[in-house]
Image (tube, rainbow, N blue to C red):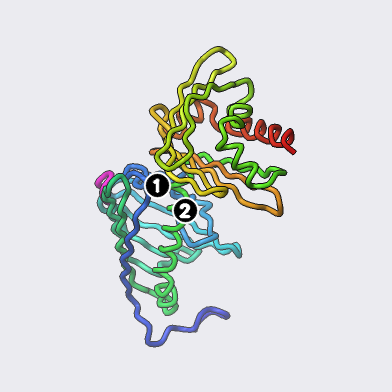
Amino acid sequence: MPAKNSPAPAVGLPMEREVTITRIFDAPRALVYQAWTNPDHMSQWFGPKNWTNPVCELDVKPGGAWRIVMRAPNGGEYPCGGVYREIVEPERLVFTNIALDTAGNHLLEGLTTVIFAEENGKTKLTLITRAKGLVPQAPYMLEGMEAGWSQSLDKLATTLASAREIVITRTFDAPRELVFAAWTDPAHIGRWYGPNGFTITMHEMDVRPGGHWRFIMHGPDGTDYLNENQYLEIVKPERLVYRHGPVPKFQATVTFENDNGKTRLTMRTTFATAEERDWVVKTYRAIEGGNQTLARLAEFLELQS
C-alpha cells in the first residue's frame, strides 16, 4: 500500500526513458570538462533551477563513485549517485546514475554518457542519459528528466561564463547619454579612466565598429601600461563592445541602462579561460581597480551636473 500522501502508481506511463540533449557552450573544452569533474564547480550548477547541492563528492576514475545530494527550494533532499565507467579526458565521461530516497533505496537506475567536442573554440556537449524506474512513482520522475537536465545545462552555461568573467555594476545619478559620452569622448575619458592615482595619455579613440582605442596608462609608481582596444559594437547610448590586447587579452562589454533618469552601468570583462581571468585579478588587482575606476567616473559625472 502506498504511504500516505505519496504519488499514486502511474498507469500507462513508461518505466524507462532515454534523453539526448546537445548544447554549444561558449567556453573551451577543458573548462567544460572541468565543470563536470571538479566537485567545487559541479556543485554550482547540477540540478534543476533554484536547487542547490549541499553534498557533491566526485571520485573521477574508472570504478570511482560519485554522490550528490540535491536540495529543492522547499528544503526537500534528493540523493543520487553512481559509478564512473569510462573516463577519457577531456573528451568523454560515462557513469551510472541512480536516484535514491533518503533511506538509500533505489528509485531509478541508468547510464549517462557525456561527450565534449571542440567546435571553433567553443564546446559542443552531447548528453545521452537513460533510466529505468524501480518503484511505482518512477514514471513521474522520468517525465521530468529532460526538463531537469535542460535546467542543469542552463545553470552550467551561467557558471562557465562567470568563471571567465569579471562583472562590475554601478548606478550613476546621471542620464544615460552623459554616461555614454563619458566613455566615448576622448576629452572626457582622460579625466577619470583608471584606478586611483593612474593617468592616461591618449593616442587614438575612433569610436566605430573596427575603430581603435589606444592609450598608455601611467601608474603612480611610474610604470606604463600600453592598452590597445578595437571596437566591435557600438549601440549609442546603450552598449559598447571592444577587444583588448595583446596582454592581457579579453573582450569587454559595457552596457548603459536607463533607471528612472539614472544610469545603471555594467562592465563585463570576458577572458578565454578561468585561469587567465584569475591571473589578471591577482596580477593587476582588476576587480579593485575596476571599482575604483567607476568611483572616479561618479566623481567626474557629479562635476558635470
Q: Is residue 69 left or right of residue 28?
A: right
Residue 46 in picture, x, y percent from top left = 45, 55
Which residue corresponds to mark 2? Answer: 45
Residue 97 in picture, x, y percent from top left = 35, 61
Which residue corresponds to mark 1? Answer: 35
Q: What stretch is highlighted in magenta?
A: 88-92
Q: Is residue 285 left or right of residue 259?
A: left
**CB atoms at circles 1 and 2 under 8 Å apart?**
yes
Q: In this view, does 198 lie to the left or right of 230?
A: right
Q: In this view, does 274 lie above or below 289?
A: below
Quadrant for residue 212, please give it.
top left
Q: Looking at the image, which residue is at 37% across and 74% down?
A: 134
Q: Is residue 218 above or below residue 77?
A: above
How many neighbours does mark 1 have within 10 angstroms: few (below 14), some (14-19), or many (20 or more)? many
Residue 208 in picture, x, y percent from top left = 45, 41
Three-letter residue code for mark 1: Ala
Three-letter residue code for mark 2: Trp
Residue 71 in picture, x, y percent from top left = 54, 59
Query: Which residue occupies the foreground of this view, 250 or 19?
Result: 250
Quadrant for residue 138, please give it.
bottom left
Overall secondary structure of the magenta section = loop
Q: Looking at the image, which residue is at 30% across and 53% down?
A: 124
Say whether disc 1 or disc 2 marks the residue closer to the N-terminus: 1
Quadrant where the C terminus lies?
top right
Quadrant for residue 3, please give it.
bottom right
Which residue appears farthest toward the bottom when viewing the image?
A: 11
Query: Which residue occupies the foreground of this view, 192 or 99?
Result: 192
Residue 57 visible in the picture: yes
